[in-house]
Amino acid sequence: MEVNTSKLIDFKDTNHAFFIIYGKQLNKLYYQIGLRAEFLNYKINYAYLNTTQNKKYNNLFPDFVMDYSFSDTKSLSLSYSKTYYLPGYYELQPFEQKLSETITYKGNEDLNPIYLNNFQMAYNYIGKKISLYSRIHYTIYTDYWQYVTYETGEQVNGLNKLITKPINLGKLNYAAAIFTAIYKPSKIISFTANTTIANFDQSGVFQIVNSANKTITQDFNSNNTNVDFSLLTKISIPNWFSVQTNVKHYLKSKGPVSTRQAYTYANFAISKDIFDKNATISITSDDIFNSSRLKRTRFDTNYISDVYSRNQYPTILASFTYRFNQRKQDRKVNFNKKEDDIKIKF
C-alpha cells in the first residue's frame, strides 16, 4: 500500500523527572509532603510546512497532604497539589477533519500545557448505619484549553464554513462541593446518595481576523453552576445474589457559548457467587432505559449549532470470573496503613 508522506509529522520528546516524598504519623495526625521536578523537551518537525517547533518545560510540582483523626469515626483532611496537562496528538495535529459539510476541526500546534493548582478539604463520619462524606474542591486552571468555533470567511454551497480548534485562553476557577451519604438499614440493603454542586468562573476573550478580513470576537467571561444527583441502591442476599441500580440526573447547564439540556440515566447489575465463592457470574446494563440523551446548543452572534446524541441501544454485558487459590476477601488491600517513609525516585 502506498503511503502519502506529504503531511507526515516527526515528533520527538524527552522527559526527565524525579520526586521526593516524606510522610510521618504523629498520634492522630498524619502528614506527607512531596516535590516533583520535571524537565520536558519536545521537537516537532512539520516537513510539508518546512517548520520545526522546539518547546521546553521545566517545572516544580509540590504537594501536601494532612489527615487528622478525631476518633475512629470522624476525620478531617487537607491537601494541595500542583500539576499540568500536556496536549496530545488530537490537540496538536494541524490537519482539518471534516465533521459536516460546513464544520471542520483542526488542532493547534502552538497549544501550551494547562497548569492546575488543586486545593481540597474533606470531612468524613463513618457510623454503624449512616456514614457521611463531604468534600470541598477548588482548582485554578491557568492557560485553560478552550475550544472555539468561528467562521473562517469561506463558504460551502452558499453557507458560512465553521472551524473548531483548541486555544489557550485565560483562567478557569473551578469550585465544587460534593456530599455523599450512605445508609445501611440492614445487612442486605444499602443506599448511597450523592450530590455535586460545581461552579465554573471563567475569564478570557478570543479574537481573530478570518480570511474575509472580518474580526471575530468571542467573550468567554462567564460564571455558571452545574448540579447533579445520583442514588445507588445495593441488595445483597448472602449465598444467593447481589443486585444494584444507579440512577443519575444532571440539571440543565449553561456556559459562555453553549447550553446543555438536563438528562437522566440508569444502570443495573446483578451478580452471583458460585463454586464456593471462587467464581462470580454477573450481568450489567449501562443506560438500561436508553435515556442518556445529550442535547447541546452552541451559539454565537452569527450562528446556532444544535448537537443531539444518544446510545443506539442499552449496553448489556455478561461476565464470568474465576479466582484461582484466592477468595474475594483475600483481595482486600489496607489503604489506611501509613508509615514513616522517605521515597526518592528518578
Image (cartoon, rainbow, N blue to C red):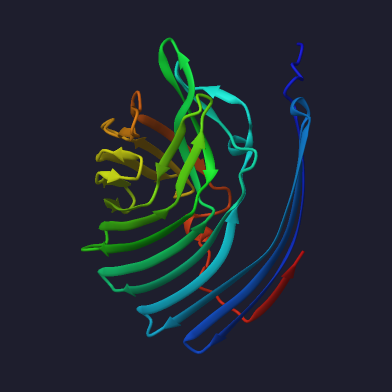
Q: How far across and down, in percent of the image, does residue 139 sit?
A: 46, 62
Q: Residue furthest bottom?
A: 27
Left or right side of 140 for 74: left
Q: How far across and down, in percent of the image, does residue 50 sit?
A: 78, 30
Q: Quadrant of residue 20?
A: bottom right
Please tell me which residue lies in front, 174 or 292.
174
Look at the image and tell me in which quarter the N terminus lies: top right
Q: How far across and down, in percent of the image, does residue 51 sit?
A: 77, 34
Q: Residue furthest front?
A: 213
Rendered position, 315 above or below 187 = above
Q: How far across and down, in percent of the image, does residue 28 sit?
A: 47, 87
Is residue 319 at all visible to an observer of this figure?
no
Is residue 219 at all visible to an observer of this figure?
yes
Look at the image and tell me in which quarter the C terminus lies: bottom right
**Residue at the spot 36% in from the left edge and 40% down from the top edge:** 257
Please tell me which residue lies in front, 137 or 214.
214
**Residue at the spot 25% in from the left edge and 69% down from the top edge:** 129
**Residue at the spot 62% in from the left edge and 26% down from the top edge:** 95
Rendered position, 28 above or below 2 = below
Rendered position, 186 above or below 87 = below
